[in-house]
Amino acid sequence: MKKIYQIPKSAQILILILFPVLIFGQKNVATNLAKYMQAQVEVNNFSGTVLVTKNGSVLLKKAYGLADYEWNIKNTVDTKFQLASVTKQFTATAILQLVEKGKLSLNDHLSKFFPDYPKADSVTIHMLLSHTSGLALGFKELALSTITSDSAYSKIKKMPYEFSPGTKTAYSNIGYYLLAKIIEKVSGEKYAVFLRKNIFDKVGMKNTGVSNNDSIISKKAKTYCRTEKGFIHNPYINWEVNIGHDGVYSTVEDLALWDNALYGTTILSKEMKKLMFTPYSSENWGYGFIINPFYNHGHQLIAHDGGFFGTMTSFNRFTDDKLFVTVLSNNESFSHIIGYGLSAIALQKEVELPYKHYETKIDTTIYDKYVGKYGKIEILKIDGKLYYNSVEMELLPESKTKFFKADNNDRTIEFIQDKSGVYNSIILTKGGVKEVAMKNK
């Protein structure tokens, strides 16, 4: 999950000096949201649907691109999309419903449900929910196979722990798969049936369900992966095993109903919601959500993103502002970055429109002046090239001081000189939102 750094007042002043004219003012939020999304379509080929609401009023609800590339069928606002890891919040909700009914406890150990699982006596339901179990991220190979549920469990048991349960935090799809299987064991119902009866039907989410390998789902978008040669079909996904951490499909309108339901107590009591929305680690994981991953400037955020072979999703609840932003894509558009930009516009921050980045040639000896740590961002120089945090992410120059990431996804870094000529800060632009990070001393 993405992390953004807080802007000190001095840095905010720096932004105003450097960028006296930015794209958006603060008068017509709805118009600015629409302009931003149109630019995402024209520049980044966004395909999917978007919904932004504030205090129950719709600021933007629109579909873009195609649900089916072969037949040139357009996405509509009621097109259904796979949610990928946004599914986790529904799994967590189902577990908390069972806790509330007294059918299980957050302190129950994995061994109660899977006695043959390695170290099962050391793993609790709480650890599975909060990504502190030590279980592996896992699942890509299993999801792409034709393996049965029983065979999948046998393979999962053999995956080594990343750390001793309860000692650290690491995002785990395996943990949420096991939670889905626990829901089935405790309730006596299939995961899809339990979610439909206890969540979707109660909320009125008529266009939401859990995918399987056989059912034909009307108005569901096909998904497409981006390659250097263009879009291709996503691979086969085995929905018999790819559940708990993934599996749910929905529409932006149904997700707005879900957002609204989370303010009430129809689905979960205040006590259960408090447990769900409490961060339990330094990485701020609650149950099925991450709490305040960014925008910590007086804007409480409960969120989760998702991504898996063509599917990219973002679900954001700014609860103090009663702001809801969701972005669903079927062609690997960077929904989390787009959601970030839309949220900033809705919160009346200045946001720059997306634009095409073009690489230019510069004297690379200047890279030596850029190398170093800026907050939690590390700029590296290796073999005459500049990298962002990792040798896997090259920074390409569009000017002497401004660079864009090689994957060209609305993220740039500009190096700023102080009065003495030293490059002591960077302006990080993500989804059009500018943040400043000072160079570590």
Image: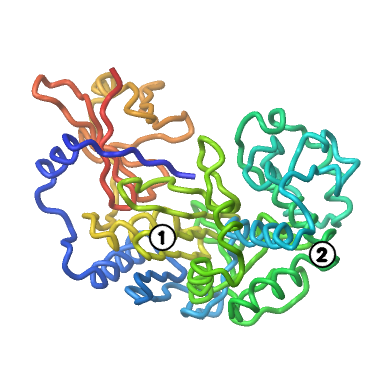
Looking at marks 1 and 2 on the same chain, the residue that comes earlier in the sequence is marked by: 2
Look at the image and tell me in which quarter the C terminus lies.
top left
Which residue, given by chain and number where applicable, does mark 2 sit on? 187
| Quadrant housing residue 248 | bottom right
Hey, what amino acid is under mark 2? Ser
The residue depicted at 85 percent of the width and 56 percent of the height is 149
State the CA–CA distance, disc 1 to disc 2. Answer: 31 Å
The residue depicted at 37 percent of the width and 65 percent of the height is 322
Task: Estimate the x, y position of residue 318 in percent, counting from the top left.
Answer: 39, 59
In the foreground, 326 or 319: 319
Task: Estimate the x, y position of residue 223 in percent, counting from the top left.
Answer: 58, 66
Hey, what amino acid is under mark 1? Thr
Which residue, given by chain and number where applicable, does mark 1 sit on? 319
Is residue 157 depicted above or below 22 in this figure?
A: above
In the foreground, 399 or 294: 294
- For mark 1, does the 10 Å Cα neighbourhood hold few (<14), some (14 to 19), or many (20 or more) residues? some
| Quadrant housing residue 121 | top right
Task: Estimate the x, y position of residue 5 in percent, counting from the top left.
Answer: 34, 38
Q: Name the element at disc 1.
A: loop
The residue depicted at 33 percent of the width and 21 percent of the height is 372
